[in-house]
Image (cartoon, rainbow, N blue to C red):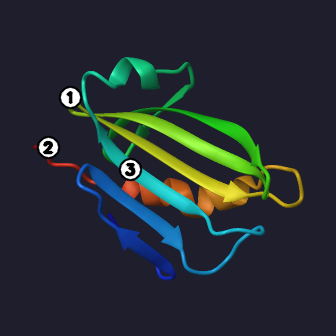
Amino acid sequence: MVLPDGWQLSSPRDGFSLIRSTPYGGGYPTFNVRVVSAEDLPSLRFDGKRVAAGPGEAEYRYERWSNARGRGYRLEALIDANGTWLFADASVWDAAGRMDETFFHEVFWPLLNSVSFDGP
């Protein structure tokens, strides 16, 4: 993966997480990728759009979210990386109340496409 300037990396056992060091849209955007076990795969399935992504074939969707601190949008992607399944999610605050697709296209999709997975 290509780590862009201004992002911090943490590596949990089954994947990795990035958080932006500088705010955007009222919060700190996050990007997470983890390996999905065969037992967890059915609960993560959804109907979304399909696209070729860096690590393999991805099915993705955008969702609106909100909590007590604000609202925003999330990108979720379930990726078949040559038989190993990855789940990626990215979220960004949206203080204006509209989806800022520019941030997803300029930041999150390039991050996802730069992920490479060689398998276990």
Q: Given this view, does label 2 or label 3 mark the residue nearer the observer?
A: 3
64 on left or right of 90: right
Secondary structure, mark 1, is loop
| x and y percentages locating residue 114 in the rendered image | 36, 59
Secondary structure, mark 2, is loop
Amino acid at the residue labelled 3: Val
Q: Answer whether residue 3 is visible to the viewer in this image.
A: no
Q: Residue at x 14, y 43 (%)?
A: 119
2 on left or right of 30: left
Kindly report the distance in space between the C-alpha atoms of the residues bearing marks 1 and 2: 9 Å
Give yes or no for contact between labels 1 and 2 (Cβ–Cβ under 8 Å).
yes
Residue at which label 3 appears: 33
| x and y percentages locating residue 64 in the rendered image | 74, 40
Mark 2, residues whose alpha carbon is within 10 Å: few (<14), some, or many (≥20)? few
Kindly report the distance in space between the C-alpha atoms of the residues bearing marks 2 and 3: 14 Å
Q: Return the disc, 3 or 1, that comes first in the chain's sequence.
A: 3
Q: Return the disc, 2 or 3, that comes first in the chain's sequence.
A: 3
Outermost residue toward the right?
A: 96
Residue at which label 2 appears: 119
Q: Residue at x 45, y 60 (%)?
A: 111
